[in-house]
Image (cartoon, rainbow, N blue to C red):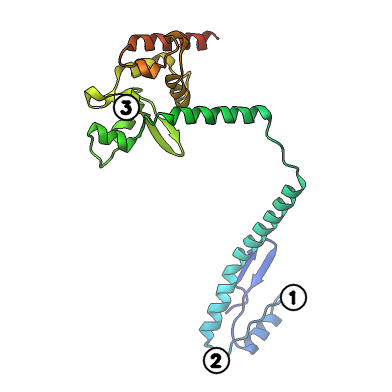
Amino acid sequence: MSAQRQVVADHLVVKAMAGSVETVRGQLQQLATHPDQVVVLTMEHARPRDSQALAETLLNLTPVISEIQQAHQSQQIEAVIRALVKPVPTPTHMLTQARMRASAINATFADGDWLTASELSQVAGFSMKNPSAQPNKWKRARQIFAVKHEGIDYFPGYALDDDNGYRPLPVIRDVLAKFGETKSDWLLAFWFSSTNGFLGGQRPKDLLKSAPEKVIAAAEDEAMGITHG
């Protein structure tokens, strides 16, 4: 193997040599500059191509070894920084908000009136080959909404008309149109599930079929308050 075969990794210039003792000794003597360090591996009962393959493999590993060393150094530096920097306590108001949000989510799911896309397609009689297709189409058309919990979309069962093949109630589309972009999916879920002063203390979700026009009016009233608030 030629002494000119080399790899530059970071600040290291590594050259690989293979062959008999006499060959390698001669290659070392012919180097223009003398290396600071030398690693020697000896092989007995090996063929020349075996020693060349080993030298080539070690040479190719040089950049990988350098990267690993740098990664370890970075990890050690980060560990020292973490040990020296005092943890910042979470502000009380953020903890309060987090607890309130968790409580609201639990209350929203407490009724158990939520369906995954697969469950919705099943009750609606759609093909199960692609169960999320139709529910997602409804969601894009703003005929229904869904909340994402732990990476899964949940659709409100109260928004479906069980007398019409579990299709979205028209009132849902109207309510979503009233709110526009002013409420996220979770805020919509909280609104439908919370008592409403405009509705005499009743929840919008409980009046979707019996008094849809009142629910739409309540949504319009709140939307106007958000816009002008």
Quarter the N terminus occupies: bottom right
Task: Give the residue pinned by disc 1.
Answer: 34
Quarter the C terminus occupies: top right
Q: Secondary structure at mark 1?
A: loop
Q: Quadrant of residue 89?
A: top right
Q: Quadrant of residue 171?
A: top left
Report how far apart the C-alphas of labels 2 and 1 lie in the structure: 29 Å
Vertical relation: 226 (above or below) 23:
above
Q: x, y percentage for residue 27? A: 66, 81
Q: Secondary structure at mark 3?
A: helix
Mark 3, Cα crowd under 10 Å, few <14 / some 14-19 / many 20+, is some
Query: In the picture provided, is 200 more to the left or to the right than 82?
Result: left
Q: x, y percentage for residue 68? A: 63, 61
- At a point 59% along the width and 81% down the height, the residue shown is 18
Task: Give the residue pinned by disc 2.
Answer: 45
Q: Earlier along the polypeptide chain: callout 2 or callout 3?
A: 2
